[in-house]
Amino acid sequence: MAEPLDPEMFDPVCPSSALPIQIGDKWTGMVVLCLEGGRRRFNELKVPLRGITPKVLTQTLRAMERDGLVTRTAYDENPPRVEYELTPLGRSLLTLIEAARAWSKDHLPALLQARLAHDSAPDPTPLSRTPDLTTGPPSPPATADLTPARPR
Amino acid sequence: MAEPLDPEMFDPVCPSSALPIQIGDKWTGMVVLCLEGGRRRFNELKVPLRGITPKVLTQTLRAMERDGLVTRTAYDENPPRVEYELTPLGRSLLTLIEAARAWSKDHLPALLQARLAHDSAPDPTPLSRTPDLTTGPPSPPATADLTPARPR
DNA sequence: TAGCCCAGTATCGTTGAGGTAACCAGTATC
DNA sequence: GATACTGGTTACCTCAACGATACTGGGCTA
């Protein structure tokens, strides 16, 4: 609640954004990290979750509320004010995120290197030719993101 | 390699199959667990991964090979024989799976209970009415599965 | 010579998460 | 009266993952 959230909290360039680890749906892990420091308003959450639409943010928060990960508090004011806060259960996900971060720190470089090596390999066995299964041109599968970028 | 894999290794009824934690794509985590005990052949892997089609299993294994998680060894025999084995990198994912299991053990019941309570709630605030966002009738989102069922 | 086995391919269809764009209610301020 | 602000909602669309089904190749066996 204290300071505003860093709009660049999640760096889209950071390769850990392409990690093969996902908590909940696409945005859940990031929402947990946004709420780590305290309660936040709807529009506050939209800032670091760059590009999220209100529909998807609502869906994500509703699902998290349903699962007991966040609480939603609506104040009868004008303009409306709604605050979201992590429950202890939601906060417990931070341990999992921490584990994923630790894995990334230790092993993600090896994974990325293997990926590069494979993509530039002269392809020894004819059977190992893969047309283009996961080799999309723009970006890898991109399942989740757990590491805030540039804590500055 | 020793004993055949248990066809019921992954119980579709086990709620941990609906966990909000996913490693790689839908099947990657389960493949890692299948290979935990040693190298396995293509058709051997299909047994516990009930319902996976050869196309999708091939896709999954090729992606894992590309990322350096498994090695693929094709023997020039007839009938063909191909064996998949975890690399140390792939094996390192087991720590992450273990962390997810530990979280499930500690917190999944609370999550499921919150979900049930929410679904049967008389819905105090009109704003908290959710049409049916994640409340699919047959099963929850079902993102991944990490816990082998009935170790027997 | 007709199949069988293994490890896949090829083609097509379905599904659902996520994205786009527009709209809304109630108050307050201009 | 017009506009803005907050926290959404609604309808529509896209695309990639996943699934169903059928087929292949090549040596082996019956």
Image: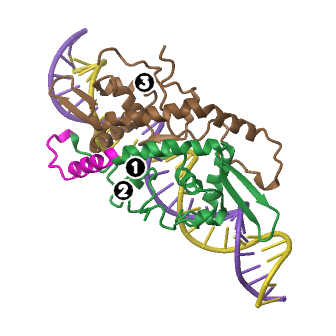
Chain colours: A brown, B green, C purple, D yellow
Q: CA distance from mark 1 to mark 2?
A: 7 Å
Tell me whether circle 1 and circle 2 mark residues in contact (CB < 8 Å): yes
- Give the label, 3 or 1, closer to the camera: 1
Q: CA distance from mark 3 to mark 2?
A: 32 Å
The residue at which mark 1 appears reads as: B19
Horizontal arrangement in the rendering, residue D15 relative to residue A10 (left or right): right
Q: Mark 3, chain letter?
A: A
Q: Position of residue D15 (x, y in %)?
A: 57, 45
Q: Secondary structure at mark 1?
A: loop
Specify the segment rendered in magenta. Answer: B106-127
Q: Say whether residue B122 is magenta.
A: yes
Q: Main secondary structure of the magenta part?
A: helix
Figure quadrant of residue A57: top left
Kind of residue sitting beneath label 3: Pro
Marks 1/2 same chain = yes
Residue A46 visible to an observer of this rendering: yes
Q: CA distance from mark 3 to mark 1?
A: 26 Å
Horizontal arrangement in the rendering, residue D28 relative to residue B93 (left or right): right
The residue at which mark 2 appears reads as: B15
Kind of residue sitting beneath label 2: Pro
The residue at which mark 3 appears reads as: A48
Q: Secondary structure at mark 2?
A: helix
- Give the label, 3 or 2, closer to the camera: 2
Tell me whether circle 3 and circle 1 mark residues in contact (CB < 8 Å): no
